[in-house]
Image (cartoon, coloured by chain):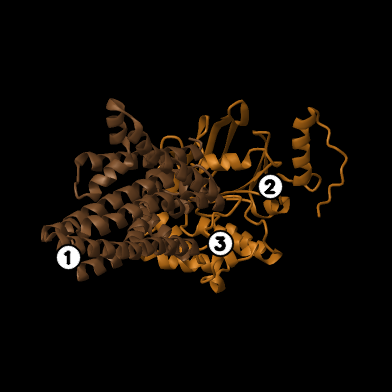
Amino acid sequence: MIEAKSLEKKYGLFTALSNVSFSVNKGEIVGFLGPNGAGKTTTMRILTGYYLPTSGDALIDGFSVVTNPMEVKKRIGYLPETPPLYPEMTVLSYLKFILEIKKIKKNLRKDYLEWALEKCGLKDRRRSVISTLSKGFRQRVGLAQAVIHRPSVIILDEPTVGLDPLQIIEIRELIQDFRKDHTVLLSTHILSEVTATCERAVIIHSGKIVHEQAIKDLSEKKSLEEIFLEVISRDNFGSNQVQNKDLSVA
Amino acid sequence: MSIWIIIKRELKSLFVSPVAYVVLGLFALGTGYYFSFSMQRFDMLLRNAQLQARMMQNPQMLNYVNLNSFLINNVTSFTFMLLLFSVPFFSMRLFTEERVNSTYELLLTSPISISQIVLGKFFAAVIFLLVALSTNAVFLAVMFSFGNPEIGPVFSSYLGLFLAGVTFMSIGLFASSITKHQIIAVIVALAINLSLLMVSWGAENAYGNLSSFLNKAAITTHFQNFNQGVIYVSGVVYFLSLIILFVTATQISVKSLARN
């Protein structure tokens, strides 16, 4: 599980995150929403042990990112905004490298590899050099890297960006497969993804958590989009008014 | 164990890229050409000496023209200079590509420490350097089969070359960790290498205590000791200190990237 406790991150005078607290329980899939620059990526980088918070702490399966980062990193799968790929490697050698670096035992590697290739639709591309792959396939390799070692906590930053509609459905199914035994936190701008896959949505704006919404509590009268816009503009203009915009999204 | 994983990956990437072969090829070409040029010069020297010895009826003179000092040492001195200028090109890819590929996030969120990442790349670079130096094996094979140079000084020269090369590699490793542009990594590494060289120029023109200090600080002095067959502990310590300095500096630079 993930527990963020009053996370604060400052870069000099600029406060990127302040008092960010939320939790994701085991078996839950939570969507992390917010406008660009709100602090989603910074939060995820702190949760994965890449950055250290200026103050506050985060617990991954009970292990602190501040005092016990190695234990945290053993339990995490992370897909950053830009998939971390080595363009000169083939898909197969890259995923084998991932298995080695995540310290998966030798006898399990073959199974995990086949499973990840299957689930992410990479079976035909196993010998392709990564630099020759299209954006969608690179995204798939990035996703494979995040889940191949069956980590207990999976953090995905915009996992469906660049994918075609069929791939999006496949990835959605892949994420849902993790529901029982793993903890998933994913960030996205596509609100329909959140309503389709997640149990809860956490909305962040200007470095602060402004709203948490259980998806099942959404009524027909208020869609997630309306709540999102309301919550964002509340901070922008200091009032409770929602701009009269056309709320249909392309 | 994790270090070995990084070494393997790094070597695979290094030898798949055409840059490695171009640089290795040019290095081999440079040393090879200088070797054959030196051979011709040595040949001339030998003939002159033989002529003089005959004229002066003094066969002892021929002992002066020995293979070690006049051929092997020339080649290794030249190789030292070539290393000083070419190692920055060997090492420029090491960390810059991690920035470009955004793979720092992968490495630093995996259960592997920064030291293991830095040391893994360092050892991969050292192995690459060994491959580059082994292109000199051809010359040694030729010289040992057609002549009989002394093996001790040769071993000492190559030890010196190896230590100097590893020093330049660690400087290049550091330079590559502070930028995402390969060209800047090359320029910074070259600048540091040249500064080390310039200390020896200063040593030539100074007097007294300053002169002896600069001499001991100059990289060429220490290499010349190795080249002449003398393995001083101070020489080994000199190179090792520089290596440790720059590898540590690389670690600090990588740590700062994780905003720790």
Q: Which mark is residue A215?
A: 2
Amino acid bearing label 3: Val
> Can residue A71 be seen?
no
What residue is disc 1 on?
A: B148
Supply the letter of whichever chain is brown.
Answer: B
Please state if B179 lies on the left or on the right of B132 as rendered.
right
What residue is disc 3 on?
A: A141
How far apart are the two marked residues, 1 and 2, measured between alpha carbons? 85 Å
Apparent colour of chain A: orange
Between disc 2 and disc 3, whose residue precedes?
Answer: 3
How far apart are the two marked residues, 3 and 1, measured between alpha carbons? 58 Å
> Can residue A130 be seen?
yes
* x and y percentages locating residue B25 in the rendered image: 43, 64
Please tell me which residue is depicted at 46% across the width and 39% down the height of the picture.
Answer: B253
Dot 1: what SS? loop
Dot 2: what SS? helix
Q: Is the residue under label 1 in contact with that under label 3 (CB below 8 Å)?
A: no
* x and y percentages locating residue B87 in the rendered image: 41, 52
Q: Which mark is residue B41?
A: none
* x and y percentages locating residue A184 in the rendered image: 56, 50
Q: Between A201 and A232, which is closer to the camera in this rendering?
A: A232
* x and y percentages locating residue B84 in the rendered image: 39, 49
Amino acid bearing label 1: Asn
| Chain of the residue that carries numbered disc 3 in the rendered image | A
Which is closer to the viewer, label 2 or label 3?
3
Q: Between A229 and A40, which is closer to the camera in this rendering?
A: A40
